Image (cartoon, rainbow, N blue to C red):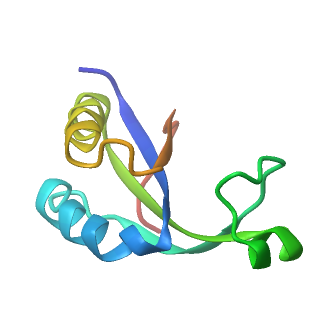
Amino acid sequence: MGGASLLTLIAPVGLEEPLVDWLLEHASSHGFCSGPINGHSASHESLTVAEQVSGRQRQIRFEVHAQEGEVNLMLERLRGDFADAGIHFWVVPLLESGKI
């Protein structure tokens, strides 16, 4: 198993509650954070007319701090449970974490 990682999920706002429930079940030992964000892209296929005019799309961002192996397992399960849901993700290694 590798070191600690940070999994970031960017999802449509309509998936906020389903993803909160899913993460409470699958990432409860780690906890997670979430919050609203604005997504910006040159690609306009999935944007409403109002989003095209404003240049932003409301989305929800989740972050989970876990060991690399656990993150990989979460991603595997997410791919099965939320196939083609439009969730964007990335994983980055954590150099350091703790409480102050």
Which residue is farthest top? 1
Q: Height in image: 58 above or below 84? A: below
**Horizontally, is 46 left or right of 94 in the view?**
right
In this orientation, which residue lies closer to the viewer: 52 or 97?
Answer: 52
Tally the numbered discs.
0
**Does residue 67 appear to the left or right of 40 in the view shown?**
left
* Residue reaching furthest to the left: 25
Residue ID at (20%, 33%) = 73
Image quadrant in which you'd find residue 64: bottom left
Q: Could you tell me residue 6's position as x and y percent? A: 44, 44
- Residue 62 lies in what quarter of the image? bottom left
Q: Position of residue 54 (x, y in %)?
A: 85, 76
Q: What's the residue at 28%, 49% (across, down)? A: 82
- 31 with respect to 4 (left or right): left
User: Which is more toward the observer, 52 or 13?
Assistant: 52
Q: Position of residue 100 (x, y in %)?
A: 47, 68
